[in-house]
Image (spheres, helix red, strand yellow):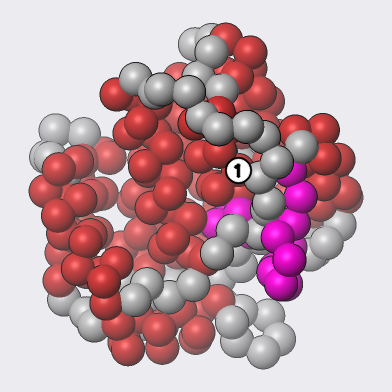
Amino acid sequence: MSAVRERIAAAPVLNDEDRARAEHYAVLSRLFASAPDADFLDKLPALAATWGNADSALGQAWLMLGDAARGINAEQVEEEYTRLFLTIGRPEVMLFGSFYIAGFLMEEPVVELRADLAELGLGRRLGITESEDHIAALSDVMRHLIVTGPDAAGLARQKAFFAGHLAPWVDALADALENAADSRFYSRTAGLVRAYFEIERLAFEML
């Protein structure tokens, strides 16, 4: 579940590229917000069939993720999610941007993030305990910015948010996922994280 509450009006019609971008951010949010349930795991191979190919890093990452989803069940993924991300003390893999940017949770990056969210008209959802710098929440914000602002002004908001709150640390997250010990599923998400955010980075650099 997202850690932010949307306060901006309904979305305009999207072109195919922005629709695909929004869908990728939705998948990333769902992968990391909580352990995928059986229904979501069942959908991943179909998504891999749609977006996967051997001709690009992103396409290869999708094929790998589809294979991972076929080779594991929801109970095993839940155990892995808990072991990697929710262990008491310092988890093996941190999902919060402030850890990678500042070295500690809930530091200055979160203060800056909250100010930017307030300026965008977004806030924390009731009942959500995770900080707003969680990768799932940030992915959800990007999805929201895409579907509500595909025009030039909206692209500028997307670029600024991405540059300030995702670009500085997503490669480090991908490395941590890739190197996670005894991981059958989440280590296979590293390629998707790395490849998709690299495409976003390059696209924003061209604006």
**Residue 161 rendering spot, x and y as whole percentages:** 67, 32
Tag count: 1
Q: Residue at x 57, y 18 (%)?
A: 155
Let me know if residue 133 is in the magenta part. Answer: yes
Residue with the mark numbered 1: 141
Mark 1 element type: helix
User: In the picture, which quadrant includes the N terminus?
Assistant: bottom right
Q: Residue at x 71, y 72 (%)?
A: 127
Q: Nearer the viewer, residue 27 or 1?
A: 1
**Residue 81 rendering spot, x and y as whole percentages:** 45, 79
Let me know if residue 97 is in the magenta part. Answer: no
Q: Nearer the viewer, residue 204 or 157?
A: 157
> In this image, 42 relative to 164: left or right?
left
Q: Main secondary structure of the magenta part?
A: loop
**Residue 192 rendering spot, x and y as whole percentages:** 35, 49
Identified by mark 1, the residue type is Val
> In this image, 183 relative to 155: left or right?
left
Magenta stretch, residue numbers: 122-137
Q: Residue at x 60, y 43 (%)?
A: 141
* Res. 183 image quadrant: bottom left
Q: Nearer the viewer, residue 73 or 104?
A: 73
Q: Residues within 10 Å of mark 1 (few under 14, many from 20)?
A: many
> In this image, 45 relative to 6: left or right?
left
* Res. 37 image quadrant: bottom left
Regarding residue 178, the answer to whether it shows in the image is: no
**Residue 12 rendering spot, x and y as whole percentages:** 48, 23
Q: Residue at x 56, y 23 (%)?
A: 149
Regarding residue 96, the answer to whether it shows in the image is: yes
Residue 60 drawn above or below residue 126: above
Residue 188 drawn above or below residue 183: above
